[in-house]
Image (cartoon, grey):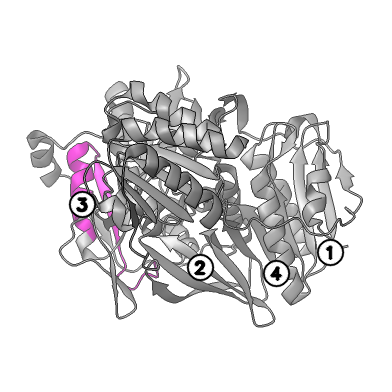
Amino acid sequence: MTDKSSIFVWIECQGEQIKPVSLEALHCGLQLSESSGQKVCAVLFCGSKVPDLSPLSDFAPHSLKVFSHGRWQDHNSQAVSSTFFKMIQEQSPRLILLPASNHGKELGALLSGLAQAPLASDCIEVECLGENDFKVKRPIYSGKAYASLALEGAGLHIITLRPNVFRGESGSATVLPEADINTTEPESLSLIVREVIKEAGKIDVTEARVVVSGGLGMQGPENFGLLEDLASVLGGTVGASRPVVDNGWRDYSNQVGQTGRSVSPDLYIACGISGAVQHIAGMSGSKCIVAINKDPNAAIFSVAQYGIVGDALEIVPLLTAEFKKILNG
Amino acid sequence: MKIIVCVKQTLDTNASIEIKDGAIHAPGSARIMNPYDEFAVEEAVRIKENQPDTDITLITLGGENSRDILKTGLAMGADRAVHIIDSDLDDFDGLAIARKLYEVIKDREFDLVLCGRQAVDQDRAQVGPALSVLLDIPAITVVTKIDFSEDYSRVVATRQIEGGAERIESPLPLLATCQKGLNTPRLPSLKGIMAARKKEVVEITDLPNTAGSVENDAKLRILELSLPPQRKSAIMLEGQPLDMAKELAQALREKEKVL
C-alpha cells in the first residue's frame, strides 16, 4: 500500500537489466525514508520477461510495482509518462526520484508538466527539510556554481539525481517485497521507438567510475588507443575535451564540459587537456582528479589533486603498466 | 511547415562566475544565444532551405537585452520573432517558464517546436518537455538527427542515450530538443544581418498566466547560490616518468582509495 506520504523511485532498465543508477536512486529514497518515515515504492517498466530483480534487494524498497508487457521493452517516454502520471493521480506520492540519465531527465520533465510539479534536476545532495519539505543542491552553469533549493508544500515534487553521487554500501540483506506485476498492454500512442542502437560493452562517460580524458595534447585520434588501454585496466571509459570532438577525433558523446557532458566519477585522469573553464566546469565534481600536461602552468593543474608535468603519450602507457601490476597483484 | 524555435540568452560559456549579493555575477562576459538553441535555429533554417514555404518564428523570454539573440536568429534565417519581456522572471522555476511560452504558442499554428536540449546556465532540461505536455504534443529530447517522411507529415529522430542512440518516429506536430551533433550552426551573413533589420519582432509585456489545469500544492524556492569548494593545490609529482607513474598508482590505491 502507498499513501500520501510515499516516495516513488523510477527503476530504469536497459534491455533486461536494471541499470546501476537506479540503485543509487533507491538508496537516496531509503535515506530520505529513514528521516521522514515516508515509504519507498519502486516503479519499473520492462518487457514481457521481468528482469532479475535481486539487485534491488541491496536497497529494498517497501513496495515494488512492475509494469511488464512486450510493448514496454523499449523505453517509450510518452507511454511511460502517461502511465506513471495515472499512478500519481491515484496514489498522490510526495516525491518522485529518478536517475538523471537521458531517459530519466526526460521522464522527470514530462511528469513535471503533467502533474504541474516542481522539478529539481541533476541533484548532488538531497535531504528532508522539516517534516514535509526537501532541500536539494544542484550544479548550475554545468558546475561553475551550485544552487540550493527548497521544495516546499504538501503536493508532488520531482527530483532527478546525478549518477555516481548517491552510491551506497549495500545494506544488510533485506527481503525484497513481492512485486505487484501489472501485465496490461499499454495504450497506443503516437511515439514509436523504431530502433535502439547500443555500442557493445561501452560504459557511458556520465556513468563510469573512472574517466580517462584526452585533449589536443594527445596529438591525434590514433593515440586515443593509449587512453582506451588505461581506461580498460581501470574499468573506466574514455572522455574528451571539446577541441578533440570538434576536430572529429572522438564522438560527441565523449565530450566532457559545459557544452558536453557533466561527470562526477571517482577518478578523472585528464591527459593533454589544458583546462578551459568550460571543461573544468564539467568535471570538477570528480572525487579525485589527476592531470598530465606538458605545460606546468596549464589551468587543469588548479583543480587536480595530482599533477604530472610531461608528455601524456609517454606517461599514459607507463601508468597503464603500473595500474595493471597493482590491480593484478 | 510552421516552426517555432524557443531561444534563451545565456552567459558566454567562456565566462568565469562569481556570486555577488546572492546572484550570479560575471563582469565583462558576453551574453550569447544558448549554444543548444543555435542548433535548433540552424535546423529550422535547413528545413526551410528544403521546404521554402516554411515559416520560422523565434520566441524568447527575458529582459530587454535578450533582443540581441533574436537579431542573431533572424540573421541566421528565421522569419519573425516574439519577445516576451519579463524582467522579474524567476529563472529557477522551469515550470513557470514553460507556462509563459505555452501562453504565447497555444494560439499559433505550428508543426514543429524546436528547443535546445537544455540551457547552459540552469542545465535543467525541463522547459522543452514540460512545454510539450502543455501543448499536448509528443516530445523527443536530446536529438542529433531529424528525418522527415516524404510528405513532411512524420519525423524519425535520432536521440542520444547512455552508450548509444535511439531512433524514434512521431507524427507532427512534435517538440524536439536539439543536441550537439545535429548540425553546425552558421554564422549570420552580412546579407542575413541586413535582412534581419526588416523582420518583425513582436514584444509582449503583459502576459496572462492561465496554464495548468492540474492543481499541485508544491513549489520550488531558491535558498542560496554557492561556488564549488576550493580545491587544495595539486601534489606535483617529480622525478623520472616511470617513478612518477609508480608513485601515482600507489597514491590512488592507498591514499585516495579510488582503485
Residue occupied by mark 2: A137
Q: Quadrant of residue A125?
A: bottom right
Magenta-tinted stretch: B66-91
Q: Quadrant of residue A133?
A: bottom right
Q: Is residue A294 above or below residue A5?
A: above
Q: Is residue A289 above or below residue B173?
A: below
Q: Nearer the viewer, residue B67 or A133?
A: A133
Residue occupied by mark 3: A297
Q: Are marks 1 and 2 on the same chain?
A: yes
Q: Helix or strand or loop: what does disc 2 sit on?
A: strand
Which mark lies nearer to you, 1 or 3? 3
Residues at circles 1 and 2 in contact by the CB criterion of under 8 Å: no
Residue B177 seen in this snapshot: no
Q: Nearer the viewer, residue B194 or A291?
A: A291
Q: Earlier in the sequence, mark 4 or mark 2?
A: 4
User: How many numbered marks have been drawn onto this rendered protein structure?
Assistant: 4
Q: Chain of mark 4?
A: A
Amino acid of disc 2 = Lys
- At horizontal 34% and vertical 69% (from top left) the residue drawn is B206
Q: Earlier in the sequence, mark 1 or mark 2?
A: 1
Amino acid of disc 1 = Thr
